[in-house]
Amino acid sequence: MVQPLPGPLAETLSLLDHYGYPALGGLVFAEDFGLPVPGETALIAAAVSAGAGRLNVVAVGVVAAVAAIAGDNVGYLIGRLGGPPFVHRWGRYVLLTPERFRRAEAFFARHGGAVVAGARFVEGLRQTNGIVAGAVGMPWKRFLAFNALGAVLWAAVWTVVGYTAGTRIATLHRYLTRWHTFALTALAAAAAVLLVRALIRRRRRPRT
């Protein structure tokens, strides 16, 4: 029996009790192309449920990974078809100005694979990395490979954490938001360092 879980986890667990794997897959899939639904929360709740014997732990991991890959590819398709005009028109709603988009384009050109794989673990980036990758023209095969890598690792990590932590996930839950904040801060710092290095190198180039 699954003991009471905190806030969003309890609500999502109730949904999973009624609809099972389709609910898990649907939430993860929808979150991964930008819809504001609790995909990662659903994965954690499903893993806790698997630990209590209600769901199969392997099926939870597989469903989450497949849904994540599919959702990100929908996001990639949206960005690819819409292109920069799509981002310039709607990006302001997420503070993605044309200037920031140009910087993101250069950043993806150099480090796109690592960004796609790592974004899976960061709130905000998880929902938008496919759209940005498509909009900046990242080759689909490269995106697919790194996206699949990130999705499998993400599904495996949270499935194992939820399955083994069980009801102790309530204690761990309050640290998850902090982890996301630290990850975002670290990623922003790394991007700033790379940007400064690029600017310094550009200034040091001899002018022709």
Image: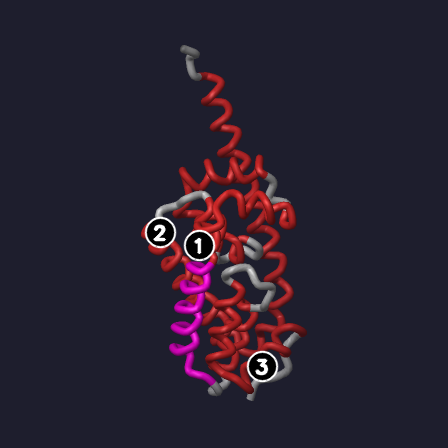
Q: Tell me the element at label 2.
A: helix
Magenta part of the chain: 55-74
Which three-letter amino acid code belongs to the residue tagged 2? Trp
Q: Residue furthest bottom?
A: 1
**Near-viewer residue (5 or 43):** 43
The earlier-in-sequence mark between 3 and 2 is 3
Crowding around mark 3 (Cα neighbors within 10 Å: few <14, some 14 to 19, many 20+) is some
Q: Residue at 49% of width from left, 70% of height from top?
A: 161
- The N terminus, quarter of image: bottom right
Q: Residue at 54% of width from left, 81% of height from top?
A: 16
Which three-letter amino acid code belongs to the residue tagged 3? Leu
Mark number displayed over residue 140: 2
Crowding around mark 2 (Cα neighbors within 10 Å: few <14, some 14 to 19, many 20+) is some
Quarter assignment of residue 15:
bottom right
Quarter assignment of residue 145:
bottom left
In magenta stretch: residue 61 = yes
